[in-house]
Image (cartoon, coloured by chain):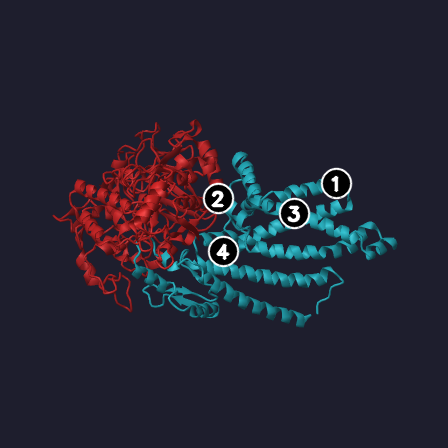
Chain colours: A cyan, B red
Amino acid sequence: MLAYLVRRIVGMLLLLFLLSITVFFLFSLLPGDPARLTCGKSCSPQIVEANRHRLGLDEPALTQYTKFVAGLFVGRTYSADSPDPIECSAPCLGYSFTRREQVLSLIARAAPVTFWLAIGAFLLWLTVGISLGIFAALRRGRWPDRVVMGISMVGYSLPSFFIGLVLIFFVIIKWGFLPFPSYVSPFENPVQFFQTMLLPWITLATLNAAFYMRLTRNQVLEVFGEDYVRTARAKGLPERRVVVKHALRAGLTPIVTAAGLDLAYLLGGAIISENIFSLPGLGSLAIGSVIQADLPVITGITLVTATLIIVMNLVVDMLYAVVDPRVRVG
Amino acid sequence: MVRSKARVIRALALGVAAALTLAACGGQPASPGSSDGTGTTPTPGGTIYMLTTAEQWNRIDPQRAYTGEDLAFFGATITRSLVSYKYSTDVEEANSLVPDLATDIGTPNADASEWKFTLQDGPKWQDGSPVTCEDVAYGVSRTFATGVISEGPTYQIAYLDIPKDEDGTSSYKGPYPIDGKVVGQELYDKAVSCDGSTITFKLAQSVPDFNFTTTLGFSPVPKAADTGEKYDSADVVSNGPYMIDTYETGNGGKFILVRNPEWDPAFDTVRKAYPDTWEVDFGIDVQVMDQRIMQSTGNDAFTIQYGNVQPANLATVFTDPQTPTPQFAGRAVSDFDPYSLYLWINVEKVPDLKIRQAMAVALDREAVRLNAGGAFAGDLADGVIKPNIGVDYAETGWATDLFGEAIPPAGNPELAKTLIADSGKPAPTLKYDYPSTPVNDQAAAIVKASLELAGFKVTPNPIEAGVYYSVVFDPAKKGDFGSGGWGPDWPNASTVIPPLFTHEGGWDLSEVEDKDFNVKVKAAQTELDRPTQATMWQDLNKEAALNAWIIPTRFGLTQVIAGSKVQPVYQWAPYGSWPYAVMYVTQ
């Protein structure tokens, strides 16, 4: 088990290293010129060059990358020879000249918002999706099954921006049941936090819950056909025990895989929901950075998101062993 | 000026606040009692909210703010300058100067190469210290630190009589020490000097409209408060009626202004400062923003929009491009903004005049306009100088006789073919640069189709919108022609023709460098007689159009909406903005 873990972690670090090179050089090849972008309109070639130097873009790409990596460990100073140098302390993921802030602190501020959004929605869709999926599977072919599948079809068909806008229009603007979202930490003001997050959770969970209903139903039905389930029933075990102890546990394996990756994906930012509900999370930070061509932030978020997905992959693989007795790592 | 990233302009009028008796006590707003022509009486108090899709201000630093909306909002609230524009619904009146921190609108010498402004004895910073001549001189000096103070206007560098180094940069490098020493301070001190409360600017040439220039980046900054690059934040110290209380960027972020207790209306005839608080909410979804203000419930009744009404909602809000529906009468405005839209043609890559003219007459400008929103998007343009600038505009005859015969709105492909034949060259293949958005993608298809009717072959080159200008300002990357837009920095075509058609101007997308034209531009810039100068600009506008350095497409029209309890609702001409300094809430 330990050897497996070490192997995976080493592989993970190697993957991240390769990813950082790819992302860094990919973004440096994009057509825009940040030096010109930060020059404004009254621009002369001299000012563009001064900006290029200030941003550290007048050095070869390899030097820039080396400084980027070094900054992660020891920090770095931008425009060291200018009258107003900018310190970026380790671990320095870069500095956003557009937002005048370290990339890491921008991400650190946005991450909790996305975390709460993702966790709340995740729990909601897992609870609703898996429960209704099992419920439908146990009543296969009967009307409750058809109703659940109908609900899932509708939920699956509605894009999240539509659900979000409809909820805002009716629940907030038209009926005034909730105030317009204004994010606060749950530890600071739990009531406002809940009022702010309720609709984003519902919006985000609707689509995923629909998917998990179908996935769970299909998995459970598939496992019901397995020999060991027939054996369990033949042994005279109570149906509840057959479903929970035998069928569900094995049927959950692909659901765990999907859930782990979906959560990791979501932790990288739920762009549409965050934007519609004005939540200052990673998704809105990412899209804002794309619009403003803020390359250091885009690079930082890409790397952080990729790291999350890689880590979650590892966690999912480890969970297999827990969920499915047939799987052992080693 | 260029448009802010997240928004644009404003519109038409109802009425403006009449002169009010000002209470001479610190930090208090104007007294109630005078009608503003809207049928309501301005009263102090309350909060005006502003919703925006943007995640932050473009720039707050007075030397770096350069979009119309930033200049208008901060000029009305926290950043005073030597002179200001008048608040009026009348375009001509609004485009005239009034004293602000200064006692008058500036005094030039005989050839307008030296300007003096005397500061009022009374305006204070938010910490209670007086606003001094030295603060103005220091603020102006910051622009010269181009490695620190970026993105702002640079007229200071262009106009002040300070020598240039061999590389073309100013010999004065700004007030921040480089290797422990401020470089060129003595040169700056010769050009900008204080005598008591009078500041003198010595210019390298005659600049008859220099007092208008001082509305951009000439605001004072107290040296002790300057934090360099980081000053573009809540660090900004106010000398206006409000001061910064909160500045949180990003989605869900807020910018809150509260009253500056040191502001005294006795020394400010420009700002009425009615609301107690301003709150700007960042990162609002564009559809949500429209719906909230249209429904106008709760605090949204006290809300204005930083952005335009979405096309999908125009039919709900407006009967036609000039008239709001009864439900939105007095809340929605539609008026011409300061911006002219055009296609630039790169003369380096398309040097043949006949070919450029063929491109111009072949374009289906009406289809481009319809694609942008039809009548709601504006009128067909005939040059880069827009009628609402005032005396500098005259019809160029673009659609009637400029090219020898009439050019219908849908273009004249037959004339284009003739012009191509006259050039003696085959119609070239052209690369069309544009910022990629759904609307622009469709416009590119129209451009391609209409030019190909005349025999050109057009390759659309969509560029990510956020980096568009950084690409097309690179001669190595830019195509043969592309889309652009421009609004004047102040109501004089000296901020239109030189930027667009001279290399020194900074926005010469067409890569024009015509010596004869430059001589005429210089003559117009230094002409002291305003009517004569206006005629010169009109001629140069016509010459640029005839040379087909640009293809004028549209004089932009924009629509905005306010909550039901905010007044007055009109477009303030200088920046095409809300009239922030005279706005108030009603009950």
Residue with the most extreme left position: B110
Residue A144: mark:
1
Provide the residue designation for mark 4: A109
Residues tagged 4 and 3 counted as in contact (Cβ below 8 A) = no
Residue A209: mark:
3
Q: Are marks 1 and 3 on the same chain?
A: yes
Q: Are marks 1 and 4 on the same chain?
A: yes
Name the front one of labels 4 and 2: 2
Nearer to the camera, B358 or B201: B358
Three-letter code for the amino acid on which mark 3 is drawn: Ala
Name the front one of labels 1 and 4: 1
* Chain bearing mark 3: A
Within the image, what quadrant is residue B165 found in? bottom left
Q: Is residue B356 visible?
A: no
Three-letter code for the amino acid on which mark 1 is drawn: Pro
Q: CA distance from mark 1 to mark 2?
A: 38 Å
Nearer to the camera, A134 or B492: B492
**Among numbered discs 1 and 3, the one appearing first in the sequence:** 1
Decide if residue B279 is on the left or right side of residue A318: left
Give the class, few, some or many, for how many residues have Cα within 10 Å of label 2's Cα (few <14, many ≥20): many
Provide the residue designation for mark 2: B285
